[in-house]
Amino acid sequence: MNVPSATDETVAPDGHETVVVLVPVAPGLDDDATRRAAFRDQILDDLERHTGVDLRDRIVVEREASVSTFADRFALPEGTALGLAHTLRQTGPLRPSRRGGVDGLYYTGAFTGPGIGVPMALLSGEQTADAVVEDAGGSRLPRVARSLAAVASFDGGFRP
Ligand SMILES: Cc1cc2nc3c(=O)[nH]c(=O)nc-3n(C[C@H](O)[C@H](O)[C@H](O)COP(=O)(O)OP(=O)(O)OC[C@H]3O[C@@H](n4cnc5c(N)ncnc54)[C@H](O)[C@@H]3O)c2cc1C
């Protein structure tokens, strides 16, 4: 749960708050109106139980996005919000290639390498740009230099 208006007064009118609740669910779920309503009730009940505040009467504007929203609006398979899962056969070199199999066609983002999530999608953009440069006869040097710089700056520690 995030309340961005707690630190940014521009995201809600005076006297109001913006509240974002993110509920992780699996892709491919049947999220019909009944199930969405049940989730909504559960979320509001949980919030009330943990904070003592019932938000129901205070909601002025409400937007929701769920599995079918991601499927219908963004044509994402099974409505996944993240991208191609990191299952064994979809990991590392087994993910779909960034080279599309047709001259001049390249893929980038969470459905190709290196993986899902914003940092991975950003890396994917870099790697695909490098692939375009390489295929056009350019140098691999920028990519190698970046990898070496990343290794040099890695401090080895996992953080909690
Ligand atoms: C609610 C939510 C929370 C998340 N939280 C996190 C998090 O905390 N940390 C994290 O690392 N990742 C998080 N993710 C996942 C992360 O957002 C994605 O993995 C990442 O954005 C994928 O990047 P992408 O560039 O592949 O695709 P997207 O970011 O989905 O970009 C695809 C773009 O293509 C556009 N598009 C689609 N079809 C067309 C078309 N036909 N023509 C033109 N444009 C088109 C879309 O509008 C979109 O702008 C979250 C995702 C969601 C939905």
Image: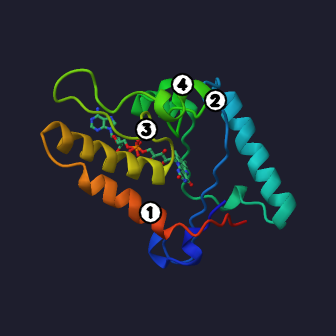
Q: Quadrant of ligand 1?
A: top left
- Residue for badge 3: 113
In x, y percent, where is residue 36?
Answer: 66, 35
The CA span between labels 3 and 2 is 35 Å
**Front position among marks 3 and 4:** 3
Tell me which corner region of the image, top left, top right, bottom left or bottom right, holds residue 60. Answer: bottom right
Instruction: Please tell me the numbered disc located at residue 32.
Output: none
- Residue at position x 62%, y 63% in the image: 2
Residue position marked by numbered label 2 in the rendering:
33
The answer to which of 56 and 105 lies nearer the viewer is: 105
Q: Quadrant of residue 16?
A: bottom right
Of badges 3 and 2, nearer the viewer stands: 3
- Residue mark closest to the camera, 2 vs 1: 1
Which one is in front, 138 or 100? 138
Q: CA distance from mark 1 to mark 3?
A: 18 Å
Quadrant in the picture for residue 64: top right
Q: Is mark 3 within 8 Å of ligand 1?
A: no
Dot 4 falls on a residue whose secondary structure is: helix
The residue that mark 1 highlights is: 150
Q: Amino acid at mark 1?
A: Ala
Q: Which residue is mark 4?
A: 78
